[in-house]
Image: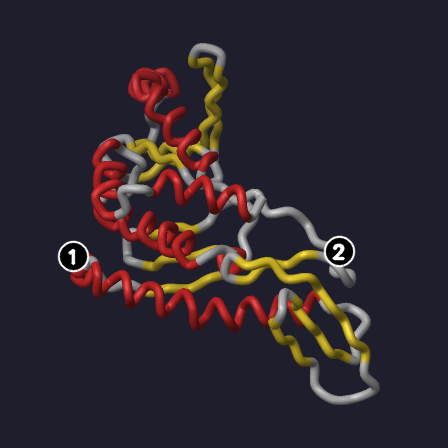
């Protein structure tokens, strides 16, 4: 795999170059911000640059769009009194040690109460978030598919895992991946991310058409996006 690097104004664009049997050049920007060019075999670098440079503004716009969509969640140290979120509400962590029995976690009266024999409660909280995300994300997706039936024509699958650089992604085959961290956000924020990814089934890039569709489905999406970033900062 080769790399090319060139200036666009004050910006430096670095792109990975792959060669294949394709007849045309393909340019992609991924959620992590990396740029990938797939070119026909034996294409000279100067020809690649000639075709890619006119699209530099679009590349920068895509990188900025992905940058604004990344999570900013802070690290936790899992000690009593620390604040943890679930579905938009804040809970203070309370830990009760016991000699034997199963680990339990409950949410009530502003407390996330863990009863455990373990010293490290992080795995308990992580398991709790994963199990809740399994149910909540699936239920919200089904609700949104009923509300916006145009997406039912796609074969959609939903999964989640903890991600550091994005709230979600959507593959062209209909596989939607959400950040498990979203279970800490309010349901409207989770719905915003799901709708965002559903829109990518129709418009893969952050084009004007993509944002037009997002605005049509969720007119106040910008306000919700800011709430998501603020609450999980």
Here the colouring is: secondary structure
Q: What is the quadrant of the C terminus in the image?
A: top right
Q: Residue at x 34, y 59 (%)?
A: 175
Residue 124: % across, % down: 67, 72
Residue 208: % across, % down: 24, 32
Q: Residue at x 25, y 39 (%)?
A: 210
Residue 156: % across, % down: 28, 63
Q: Is residue 27 above or below residue 136?
A: above
Mark 1 — residue?
150
Q: Residue at x 44, y 57 (%)?
A: 178
Q: Nearer the viewer, residue 218 or 29?
A: 218
Tell me the quarter of the picture where residue 76 sits: bottom right
Q: Residue furthest top?
A: 9
Q: Residue at x 62, y 69 (%)?
A: 109
Q: Nearer the viewer, residue 152 or 191?
A: 191
Mark 2 — residue?
77
Instruction: Give the secondary structure at mark 2.
Output: loop
Work out whether residue 138 can be spotted: yes
Q: Is residue 19 above or below residue 81?
A: above
Q: Residues within 10 Å of mark 2 (few under 14, many from 20)?
A: few
Q: Is residue 182 above or below residue 1?
A: below
Marked residue nearer the N-terminal end (2 or 1): 2
């Amino acid at each position: 795999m080769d790399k090319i690097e060139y200036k666009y104004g004050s910006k430096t664009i670095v792109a990975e170059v792959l060669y294949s049997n394709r007849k045309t050049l393909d340019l992609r920007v991924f959620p992590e911000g990396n740029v990938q060019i797939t070119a026909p075999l034996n294409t000279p670098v100067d020809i690649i640059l000639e075709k890619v440079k006119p699209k530099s503004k679009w590349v920068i716009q895509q990188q900025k769009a992905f940058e604004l969509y990344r999570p900013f969640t802070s690290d936790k140290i899992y000690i009593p009194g620390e604040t943890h979120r679930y579905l938009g509400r804040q809970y203070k962590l309370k830990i009760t040690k016991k000699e034997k029995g199963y680990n339990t976690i409950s949410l009530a009266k502003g407390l996330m109460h863990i009863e455990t024999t373990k010293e490290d409660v992080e795995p308990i909280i992580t398991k709790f978030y994963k199990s809740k995300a399994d149910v909540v994300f699936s239920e919200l997706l089904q609700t949104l598919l009923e509300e916006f039936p145009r997406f039912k024509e796609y074969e959609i699958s939903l999964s989640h895992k903890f991600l550091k650089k994005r709230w979600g992604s959507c593959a062209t085959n209909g596989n939607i991946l959400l950040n498990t961290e979203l279970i800490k956000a309010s349901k409207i924020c989770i719905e915003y991310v799901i709708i965002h990814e559903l829109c990518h089934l129709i418009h893969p890039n952050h084009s004007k058409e993509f944002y037009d569709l997002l605005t049509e489905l969720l007119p106040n999406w910008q306000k919700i996006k800011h709430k998501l970033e603020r609450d999980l900062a």
